[in-house]
Image (cartoon, helix red, strand yellow):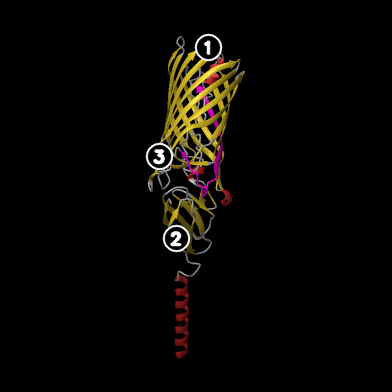
Amino acid sequence: MKYLLFLLFSFSLFSEASAQCCSVGSPVGGTTSIGTLPQNNFRYTLFYRYGYGNRYYIASELVNDTKINVKQAFSNYVGLFIDYGLLNRLTITGECGYYINKVQDWGEKGQFEASGLSSAVLMGKYNLLNDIESEFEITAGMGIKIPFTSKRIQKNGVDLPRDVQPSPGAFGFVSQLYLRKGFSDISANLFLVNRIEINGSNEDDLDYRYGNCYNTSFFITKKIVDNLIGILQIRNEIKEKDRDNFTGEISTSGSNLFFFSPQINYSFGDLSVSALYDLPVYRYYNNRQLGGKYSFALNFIWQMDLSGN
Amino acid sequence: MRKYFYILISLLVITLIGCKKEESPTNPKTFTFVSLTASKTEIDINEFTDITATATGENLTYRWSCTEGAIFDNGPKVQFSICHATTVRITCIVSDASGNSESKDINIKIGQK
């Protein structure tokens, strides 16, 4: 059963809330913490993610244009989740993230680079149903997204492009729904996770508002050997168009993406480590956008039981 | 008496000339944001256009921003480019050491060949 505890918290739901025409997206939701904890249990999840993209797309078609200025874009991101089991059915979660760097490379013209804190999310998750006999579980959560800054980063008096800004700069609302069906006789589990992020407007002079994100993931997990679990994930990310008060809808924002993400998870004692690779299998971008080529992530999870049981 | 009259007239002329010089917009010590211009106000995607802020004053600083796209370089002359068709507003705020500040916008239309 212990391996399942770790599993519940080590899946990834990458949110593209900050993706725009020339960036590879940002894990505002990051690797998400999805289940509840027993009362008086703490869980720390530290994760790292690297994302890379170097090809433009119009809708689903690759653009073959040698005049493209942005040669590549990549980001290094670390995130931290802290979960606390307030009650046996109620867990509170704090999320925050930091961009080590977020880079847009324009070849000979140079590159734009920024780093900084992204957003924080405070969320409460309640276990609506946990039928041990049928191994069926439903957990729902909701919370608020809090920006660390609403100001754009500038260098030498010039605002850096929005694509490399680490923070969306606006408050938002987050909801999450998590369903699990277990098959203990074959040491397997099915998961369905849905996460919605409603973004508010930035307080800058443009009232910039990132499009809402709707992420849905389907996971299959299978115990391979003791402490080692294999996970296959299919994930859909729908992102609406961004808006501002000058352009209206930003035509080169918003997308519908499907990913295939294999993952392995190894646990020892109170620690668990997992690694995953994110491979896009279907993409549709509005207008013309830089598409993510791949990303990978490493998660470290540590759980503490303070209940004395 | 006539001597004092000529001295008074001379002082008046000198004072007037001096005042006129200080009020002139061409005097570099007077803060004036004269213009914000672009070498091209219509460009193709991935093409560059030069944006120039012309201002007078002491210890001028330039703050640039745009609604979309990217601005290169800094100071009174920058370059702008973007990867998709749209219309972009570029804003420049010029300030001097005395706290004077003025903002100007210019719109750049980006088309697709």
Label 3 residue SS: loop
Dot 2 crowding, Cα within 10 Å, few <14, some 14–19, many 20+: some
**Residue A25, percent from left and from top:** 50, 37
The range drawn in magenta is A61-85
Q: Quadrant of the C terminus of chain A?
A: top right
Residue B1 in sight? no
Residue B64 lies, in percent from the top left, at 48, 53
Q: Chain of mark 1?
A: A
User: At numbered mark 2, what does the secondary structure look like: helix, strand or loop?
Assistant: strand
Q: Which residue is under mark 1?
A: A186
Q: Position of residue B73 (x, y in %)?
A: 54, 55
In the picture, measured across the screen, residue A193 lies left or right of residue A273, that is left
Residue appearing at x 50%, y 25% in the figure:
A233
Classify B13 as above or below A114: below
Q: CA distance from mark 2 to mark 1?
A: 70 Å
Question: In which quarter of the view is residue A227 placed?
Answer: top right
Look at discs 2 and 3 and give the one toward the viewer. 3
Q: Are marks 1 and 3 on the same chain?
A: yes
The answer for how far apart the CA atoms under marks 1 and 3 are is 43 Å
Chain under callout 3: A
Element under disc 1: helix
State which mark lies toward you, 1 or 3.
1
Task: Give the labeled residue for mark 2.
Answer: B36
**Marks 2 and 3, how far apart at CA:** 31 Å
Q: Is residue A15 above or below residue A189?
A: below
Does the magenta run of residues contain A81? yes
Mark 1 or mark 3, earlier in chain: 1
Judge if badges 2 and 3 mark residues of a common chain: no
Query: What residue appears at the point 51 percent right and 46 percent down from the top-left corner?
Result: A153
Residue identified by numbered label 3? A241
Using a 10 Å C-alpha cutoff, classify the residue at mark 1 as few (fewer than 14 neighbours), some (14 to 19) or many (20 or more): few
